[in-house]
Amino acid sequence: MSMMIRMRDLSTLLALSVVGMATAQVPTKCLEIESILVDACNPSSTCPGSSEGQNEMVRFRVGPAPIALSDLEADWPNGSWRGLVQNATTASITAQLNATIVSCGLLVEPPQGIMPAGAQVLMVTSTEMCVVGNSFAALADTLHIIFQDAGNTAGHFANSPAAGMPVSPTPPSGSGQRTLILFDNGTNCSDSATYVRELLVNTLGTYGGQSGESDGGTAEFSWPGVPQASYVNYGCQAPFTPLLVEAEAVGTLCGGTGTVSISAQVIGGAYTSVQWTGGTGTFADPNALATTYTAGAGDLGTVTLTLCAQTDCAAPICGSVQVPSGNGPSITITANGPLALCPGDQLVLTAAGADSYTWAGGGNGATLTVTTPGTYTVTGTNQCGTGQGSVEVTQASAVVVSISGDTEICPGGSTTLTASGASSYVWSTGTTGPSITVSATGTYSVTASSNCGTVTQSVTVSMGTAPAVSISGADMICSGASVTLTANSNAPLVWSTGDTGSSITVSTPGTFSVTATNGCGSSTASSTVVEGVQPTVEVAGADILCPGGSMVLTATANAPVTWNNGLSGSSITVNSPGLYVATATNACGTDTDGHQVNASLLTSAFTATPSSGAAPLQVQFNNTSAQGATSAWDFGGEGSSTATTPTFTFVDPGVYTVTLVTAMDGCTATSSVVVVVHTPDPGGASTIYVPNVFTPNGDRINDVLAIAATNIASLEVLIFNRWGEQVTELKRVGEVWDGRSISGNPVADGTYFYTLKARGIDGVDYDTAGHITVLR
C-alpha cells in the first residue's frame, strides 16, 4: 500500500537569511499585490479604543523600478485614499514593531521615502494601528513598512458575512467581490486584486464562528499573470508567510523491514542546510530534501522521521512525517446483522484490516453476501503479508417466547412477569421491555420480536389464597422404631421440630405440627403419634353348634381384628363347625387366637308301627335318635310322653301328627310321623279319599296331606307341579306329604296335581287323578 503523508511544523518560526533559496523573483510590472489582511485583529483587552479599520494591511512586491511613496496611491473597496506618511510617528511605530520580533526578520521604512526595486512592502492602513494587535514575532524576512495617514476607522475591506454565525464546513451563499487597485503614478502603472468575502476562512479552515475564530481572514494572490485568490488564516498575525518545513513519505514499512521514499520542502524563507533524523534505520542521503529510508529492527509501529532546515537564526526549522511500520494484516469480519441467519434472509459480511481480500469458496473484495449457515473464511493481503479471519454463521430458529413468573397474586399484592426468547417486547398493557409488574388478575399477552419474526404469548394471572396443608403417616410408634410424617402442600413448610422439608422422621410419641406459608398467608396442621403396644387377642364363644343353628364368636383385642374366614371385626356369626382363628394386627406386630366349634351329635328320628289302621289303634314308637338325648313326645294332641320308646293307643279315628323333640348339649331336634286311624268297617269294603288342600305352616293343624284309606292293600300317589315336574311321591298307606319336595325343600304355595293308583283288600282297583292346593 502506498501512503503519502505531509506534516508542517509551525512551532518554531524563526528568521532566515536567504541563503538556501534563489534570489527572490522580481515582478516585471511596477508592482504585484500578494496579500490582504481583510479581518484584522484588534482585541479590546490589548488594543483598547482601536478599531479594526486601523489595523488592516496589504503586502505587495515592488517591480523592477523603485517607487516613491508620493507616487503610490490606492483605490480601496471601501473608503477614500488618505495618502502615505513617513515621520517620527511612523518611525516610532516601526521601532515598537521590531521590538516584538523574536525571529531574525526586520521591518524598515523606505529610505528617503523610496521603495527599492524587488522589495516586499507591507502597507498599514493607519498610523493609529495597535502595535500588539497582529503579531510580527515570527517574521523571518526583511519587509519595508509604510503607513497610510490616520483617519481610517471604518475599514477599507468587507469581512466574511458568516462572521458571528455557527461554524460550518461550507461557505455561505453569495459572491460579494471586493477589488483593491494600487497605482504607481510615476510610471502610470497599476495592479489589482479581487477577493470574494464569502470565501474568507476562520482559524479552523472552515467558515463562520465568533470574532476570535474569524479574525485573521486573509486573501493571498498569485503572480505573474491574472491574480488567483486563495484564502488562509494565520490568526492574529501580520500578512507575511511564516517559515515552515513540509515533509512527506510514500510507502509503508513492515515490522522493521522495507524502504520508503521521503521528501521535504522549506517554505517561506532561506536555509543553509538540511538533515534527516529519526527511526533506527538508515537514510540514503540524510542531507538531501528527497531521499529514501530503510527500516531498522526497532522500527515497529509508527516511525517518525524529521527534516530540520538550518537557518541564519539561532534554531533550525523542522518538519516531521510519520511512517506506518505494519505487519501482516489482522483481519476482522463484521456483519450487517446478527450472525444467526433467519430462514430466507441474507447477511452481508465485511472484512477489514487488509488491502485486498479473497473468500474461501469463491469471492473477492471486502464484502460477501451469504444465505446459508456455515463458517466463512477470508484471506486478506497487504504489502506486509497475508492474514485470515473466520466467522461462524448459524441458523436461527423461529421466535419462541416463554413467560415466567408467579401466576397467582394475593389480595393487595403483585407479580412480575418476564418474557424471554426475543429481542424486543410489547405487552398488552402498553409496556415495552421484557418484564411487567401487575397487581390485577386477568390475561396478559406479550408480542415479542426478533430478527426472525414476531409472535404473541399470553399468561393468565389469578387470585391466590393462603396455602392448604395436611399430614399423612402412621399415628402410632412402636418401641425402638420410627415413623415418617409427610406434609401435603404446595407452599414452603416449617415443622414444629424446626425442619423445613416435606417429611420428618420421629422416634418418640407426641403431637407434631407443620405450617405452610406463602405470600397470601399460612395454615397449620398437626398429627398426634401415640406409643404403640404389642397387639393381643382372645376369642370366646360356644363350643357346640346345634343342628341348623348359628353362634357368635367374639374376639377381645387391642388392635384391628381379621378372621381366617375372610371376615373382620371383633365378632362374627358362624353356622358351621370348624376352627376359627382371629388375628389382631397393628404397627407393632400381630397376635392370634383360635376357637374350635364342634357340631352337635343330636338327632331326632323314630318309626311308628303300625302307622295306620282301624280304631282303636295301638302304635309302637321306635326312637332312633342320638344316644344320650332326652325325649319329649306329642301324640297329635292326644297325649305325651318322655319315655324313650313309648307305646300309645289312638282311640278315635283321625290323622295324627306325632312329634318327637330331643335335647342334648343345649340343642333341640324335632321329628314327626303321621298316624292315620280310620273307622272300622265290619263289611271289609275298601274306600279311599284324597283331601284337596292342606296348610304345612307348622301349627300342627292340617300340616300334612294324609290320604284316608280303608281296607286298602297297596297305594301309589305321584304329585306334580304346574310344569309337570314331579315333586314327591307316596308309596304306602299311612304315608303323608309334609309340603317338601324330594330334595327336602318346602314347595311354593299353589296348585299341584296328582295321580293315584290303589287296590283294596276287596279286590277293587283305584286309578284316578286330581289337584291339591298348598296354603301356608
Image (tube, rainbow, N blue to C red):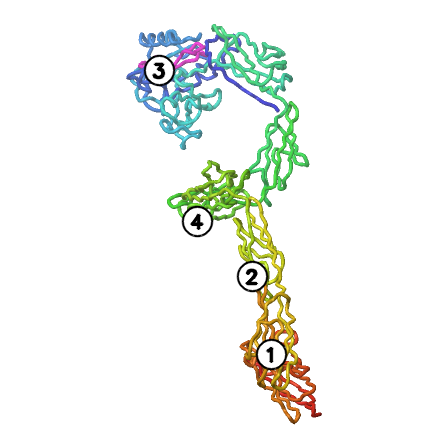
Q: Tag 1, which secondary structure? A: strand
Q: Which residue is mark 2?
A: 551
Residue type beneath disc 2? Met
Q: Are marks 2 and 1 in contact (CB under 8 Å)?
A: no
Q: Distance between the Cα atoms at labels 4 and 2?
A: 63 Å
Q: Tag 4, which secondary structure? A: strand
Q: Which residue is mark 3?
A: 133
Residue type beneath disc 3? Gly
Residue lying at 31% horizontally and 14% vertically, measured from the top left: 128
Q: Are marks 4 and 2 in contact (CB under 8 Å)?
A: no
Q: Along the horizontal axis of the image, is 752 left or right of 556?
A: right
Between residues 433 and 327, which one lies in front from this camera angle?
433
Residue 515 picture quarter: top left
**Residue 648's mark?**
1
Q: Tag 3, which secondary structure? A: loop
Mark closer to the observer (1, 4): 1
Residue lying at 44% horizontally and 30% vertically, measured from the top left: 170
Q: Distance between the Cα atoms at labels 2 and 1?
A: 38 Å
Q: Along the horizontal axis of the image, is 485 left or right of 618?
A: left
Mark closer to the observer (3, 2): 2
Residue type beneath disc 4? Ser
Mark sitting earlier along the chain (1/3): 3
Q: Distance between the Cα atoms at labels 4 and 3?
A: 82 Å
| Crowd band around label 4 with a 10 angstrom C-alpha radius: few (<14), some (14–19), many (20+) | some
The majority secondary structure of the magenta stretch comes to: loop
Q: Which residue is mark 4?
A: 462
Mark sitting earlier along the chain (4/3): 3
Q: Give the magenta range.
A: 117-143
Mark sitting earlier along the chain (2/1): 2
